Amino acid sequence: MSALHALVVDDETSARMLLERGVANAGFSVESAEDGVQATNMIRKKLYDLVVTDLMMPGEVDGVGVLEAAKARSPRTSVVLITGHASVETAVEAMKKGADDYLQKPIHLDELAIKIGRVRDLSLLVRDTQELQEAMDVTESSAAETIRELDAKVSELQLVLDSVREILSSEAPHDRKIVKALEALAEPTI
């Protein structure tokens, strides 16, 4: 199974580094972006299992814009927002738009580990479910082909048995019926 990929977005270097470390400790390969524009460009080029983004960032694209880009790229991408105390209402509104969770600043590594761990576990469960579904589809297809092949063989055998039954019920002498029945059974159609 390939690694889970995460994108961390924060304009504050120290916060970004803290988030990178916490997300990496949860088992993700981590990339980072300094702002929303850089993040949305990265999201267009690569599919991420998780995006952790600051909600309030300067520039053209804020955390909600990153959220929208991530969900547009793949609805299965989990998004965790980082918010200051004053923007909790905005975070709740963003969750209505598809964010999976949010953390308040200052970030506590224990809380980050718990939330990211849940996202990781859910992402792995979704991935395992997809792989299992693909394996079931292949197995089902293979089984269907085997059933078709067996049906064809049964039909061929039924024709041979019908022929043998007809030969054996004929008025020909017994030794002649046996020879013809054996010939019918030896035909390469089976």
Image (cartoon, rainbow, N blue to C red):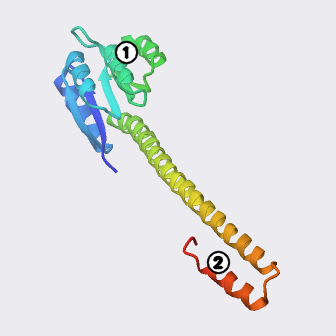
Q: Which residue is mark 2?
A: 184
Which mark is first along the chain, 2 or 1?
1
The quadrant where residue 119 appears: top left
Secondary structure beneath label 1 = helix
Regarding residue 18, the answer to whether it shows in the image is yes
Q: Could you classify mark 1 by the number of other residues whose Cα lies within 10 Å: few (under 14), some (14-19), or many (20 or more)?
A: few
Q: Amino acid at mark 1?
A: His
Q: CA distance from mark 1 to mark 2?
A: 88 Å
The quadrant where residue 17 appears: top left
Residue 139 higher or lower than 60, as above or below: below
Regarding residue 83, the answer to whether it shows in the image is no
User: Where is residue 127 shown, x and y percent of the image?
Assistant: 42, 43
Are discs 1 and 2 less than 8 Å apart at CB? no
Q: Which residue is mark 1?
A: 85
User: Where is residue 84 shown, x and y percent of the image?
Assistant: 34, 16
Please name whichever residue, 42 or 179, is drawn nearer the observer in this view of the structure: 179
Residue at x 71% of width, y 72% of height:
163
Q: Amino acid at mark 2?
A: Ala
The quadrant where residue 33 appears: top left
